[in-house]
Image (spheres, helix red, strand yellow):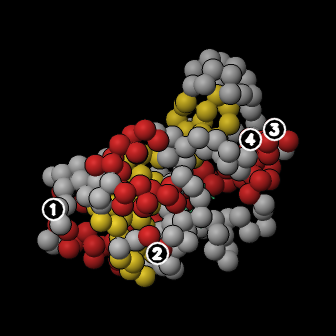
Amino acid sequence: MRPIENIVILTGAGISAESGLATFRGPDGLWEGHRVEDICTPEALARDPVLVQTFYDARRAALASVEPNAAHRALARLDAGWKGELLIVTQNVDDLHERAGAQRMLHMHGELKSALCRRCGGRSEWMDTLIDGPACPACGAPGGLRPDIVFFGEMPYQMERIEAALEDADLFVSIGTSGAVYPAAGFVQTARHYGARTLELNLDPSAGSHFFDKTRIGPASRLVVQWVDSLLGG
Ligand code: APR
């Protein structure tokens, strides 16, 4: 079996659960009480901008009261210490990976702390609310900003970079994701196809658990720390 040099890590809402951010599909999940298509689609934003902007304004505001947990910190430690290639692909729109210090990472589903202008296509760092229709810092147009979030039906960000990393990966690790949403749910199969070993760390077996060589069940704060320690020899 080839040595592990290149690692791709996929994270989902489960890695931020112990920081106090609700997952999407759990019993107290964010989509409970909301239908996904009422919130997280371009059509929903056009039909009911107040509902959608209020929902994401609340998610953005909630970031101020949460902190990265041991799992985010362990991945940042791995990023800093791993000599080979490494890419953390997060589906999360929170900023806890970067606040923990991770650098080799990307947000495939967008970020709460970014606003996207529907007029000029510009992206601006955004900490405030969007409900009042502020002007775009890039083009000055009022009322055109939306959350820089990849809605259902839209293309996730940086797919070419992700695919290239998956092709080169020796190890693919999925952390805290239910495997319900594609294309992320299919990354394990792509990585396997190109010869990577595959590992799942999750509180419950995901929808695609059977695709992984190994699945470890438990909280991310424990499993991710153990896994990173084993890789770094700590
Ligand atoms: N440690 C590890 N895993 C956990 C923990 C924890 N402490 N708590 C929950 N989990 C697991 C759950 O068992 C579940 O499998 O995290 C997963 C969370 O699943 P979802 O709520 O479906 O979140 P996610 O997979 O990130 O959703 C994918 O769907 O709604 C869209 O765009 C949104 O990026 C999101 C995408």
Judged left or right of residue 10, residue 182 is right
Which circle marks residue 42 in the picture?
4
- What separation in Å lies between label 3 and label 4 (alpha carbons)? 6 Å
Mark 3–mark 2 contact, CB under 8 Å?
Answer: no
Residue receiving disc 3: 46
Q: Nearer the viewer, residue 210 or 216?
A: 210
Give the camera-side residue of 153 and 52: 153
Q: Which circle's residue, 4 or 2, is located before the other in the chain?
A: 4
Residue at the limit of the structure toward the right, as seen here: 47
Closer to viewer: mark 1 or mark 4: 1
Query: Does the residue at mark 3 contact the one at mark 4 (Cβ under 8 Å)?
Result: yes
- In which quadrant is the C terminus drawn? bottom left
Residue 213, image quadrant: bottom left
**Three-letter code, disc 2:** His
Circle 4 SS class: helix
How far apart are labels 3 and 2 at the CA level? 39 Å
Report the number of discs. 4
Check the image and report above or below for 227 versus 125: below
Label 3 residue SS:
helix
